[in-house]
Structures are given as structure tokens and as C-alpha cells.
Image (tube, rainbow, N blue to C red):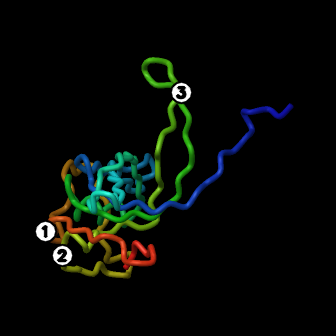
Amino acid sequence: MANTSTIVPPTISVGIKGNITDDLTLNATPQGVPVCTFSVAENHRKFDSATNQWQDAGVTFWRVTTWRRQAQNAAASFHKGDAVIIAGRFTPNAFLNKEGHPQLGLDVSATDVSADLNFATVQVTKNPRDEQTAPQYAPQAQQAPAPQQTLAPQPETQQAPAAGGNMWG
């Protein structure tokens, strides 16, 4: 019988498309490495061919963590309600909730964080590539730097799947 304390859960690559549900939190590790955390709600929809309408099919909440310069840029760029696309690594995190029932934590270490251009426009401001001229994280700062991107949410419009079943058009 295997010792379960030595079992390492698998890391799974995921892509998430949703909306930020809370303000982003920018902190630093004791070594001074910037880390940004926030949550994303991923709304699921399905097309009902009987009614020719899109139907809500539930929501999944993800806890996202990003590191270093991307953490600083995310904190400076995004706010609650913004539509984002996340790529990252999901490692299952089983725990007991307050009532003692088992739950699965949906935590993602983001490798990429970007605006969902279906719902926003973005003006890109490049950061310097030279680390010596790059902005440094200041642990004493309580607020994120001024936003570098302007996001303008647009209403969602979804089309019925094309004939032949290709839902991506």
C-alpha cells in the first residue's frame, strides 16, 4: 500500500476565460518576489437547439496567482469585472470545508494573463526589457501602480453554432 503523504498531485494545463470577481492583491514573498492573486468566474453556456437560445450552464470560480513582472503588470492593468483570459497550471488541492465536507480548490498558477478582446480594447504600453531600468516592486506600497491598459467592457453576443457542429465558427 502506497503512503499517500508522498503522492504528488498532477499538474494540469488549463485555459480560463472569465471575469475578475474581486480586487487584485499585490504582495511580495519574504525574498521580495512580487505575487498577485485574484479570482475569476468562468461562466458556462450551452446552445439549446430546441429553443434556438443560449442557456446558462453554471459557473466555475478559479483562484489565480501570478508572479514577478506579470504580477505587477496584472495589478496595474486589471480590476474587478474585467474580462480576462488565463493560461496556467492547475494542481488539484483537496481540503475540508467549514462543514467538514471534502472540496476541491481550483487554484491556478498563471503563466499568461491577458484581456479578453471580445469584451475590451487594450492600449499596450511596453515595459523596458532591461531589468535594471524595469520598475521594481516596493513592498511598502499599499496600492497598485496606475493602470497601463484601458478596458472597456462590451456586451456579449453569441451566435448559434454553424451548421456541421463547429461551435467556433
SS at mark 3? Answer: strand
Please report the residue visible at 45 percent of the width from the left and 51 percent of the height from the top. 31
Q: Amino acid at mark 3?
A: Pro
Q: Quadrant of residue 116?
A: bottom left
Residue 121's disc number = 2
Do the numbered discs 2 and 1 sit on residues whose CB atoms are within 8 Å? yes
- Quarter placement of the N terminus: top right
Disc 1 residue crowd, few under 14, some 14–19, many 20+, Cα 10 Å: few
SS at mark 1? Answer: loop
Residue located beneath label 3 in the image? 102
Decide which of tag 2 and tag 1 comes sooner along the chain: 2
Name the outermost residue toward the right: 1
Residue located beneath label 1 in the image? 152
Please report the residue visible at 36 percent of the width from the left and 54 percent of the height from the top. 44
Where residue 142 appears, x then y in whole percent?
21, 48
SS at mark 2? Answer: loop
- Quarter placement of the C terminus: bottom left
Q: Amino acid at mark 2?
A: Thr
Q: Nearer the viewer, residue 125 or 131?
A: 125
Q: CA distance from mark 1 to mark 3?
A: 39 Å
